[in-house]
Image (spheres, rainbow, N blue to C red):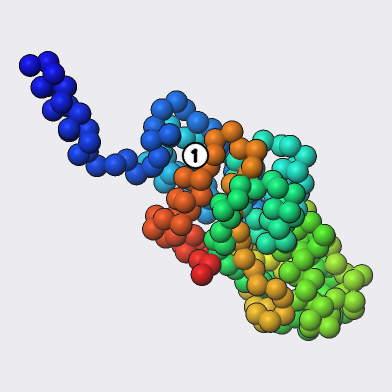
Amino acid sequence: MAGFALMVGLGAIACAEPPPISTDLAGEPITLTISAAASVQDALQEVQVAYQDVAPNVTVTYNFGSSGSLAQQIVQGAPSDVFLSASGEWMDELAAQGDLVDGSRRDLLTNAMVLIVAQDETTVADFPDLQRADVGRVAIGEPDSVPAGSYAKAVLTTLNLFDALQPKLVFAKDVRQVLAYVETGNVDAGLVYATDAKLSDRVQIVATAPADSHPPIVYPVAVVQDSQHGAAAQAFVDFLSSDTAVAIFKEYGFVMAE
């Protein structure tokens, strides 16, 4: 009888619905560190809440910053399980050094560059207006380490404005600092991602950069080679393309990469 009961129990287990995540994640508590571009901060914090319903034993922590700084931290051995960059360039750097798990990389999101000013600003209506004498300082991200800054420089260069605006440019550590500078009136205008501008009711978008004025803005994501929780990290990356996560990203203005 005991043998029969055991067989019945095993049969029930075999027929049970598979869990929504890898069984590797169903045991002891796991903490994942996600290194992510500052521009996805708000969306990812909402994703974090949703992921708790899927993987309750997985604690997701974030390290937000400029993609260049985050990439350098990973190269130097800082703990990280997943890297979500606002630029393919920094992801390429890590891949070339063997710092990413083969096959884990995918393009996740796309964005646009916009010119913003304070809500009550009427002087600037388009990019050429930045040359006006009554426009003081213009903020962009640091081009060498902040993807938004690199894209902004490309936009201004394509529009033949970068050299003329050099004396006015203020360089920020990440795109959120550019947004803050405009919100507080420390600068007269700034170039940020469309998704960042959407977050603030203290700024207005006055122009969108032509799509051909800068390289495509694509956010790749991948599992870091040195992750101590490879299966859990990959499961989180997979979740970022789920219907739940996609709805959150779209709510914040992102477009999913094809």
Depth check, front residue: 117 or 213: 213
| In this view, 190 is above or below 85 | below
Residue at 12%, 15% (x, y): give it: 2
Residue at 65%, 80% (x, y): give it: 211
| x, y percent for residue 18 | 29, 42
| In this view, 242 is above or below 168 | above
Which residue, as the protein is rendered here, is positioned at the far left? 1
Depth check, front residue: 174 or 7: 7
Residue at 60%, 68% (x, y): give it: 111
Depth check, front residue: 199 or 23: 23
Residue assigned mark 1 = 232
Mark 1 is on which residue type?
Ala
Report if residue 229 is visible in the image.
yes
Report if residue 253 is visible in the image.
no
Label 1: state its secondary structure: helix
Q: Quadrant of residue 167?
A: bottom right
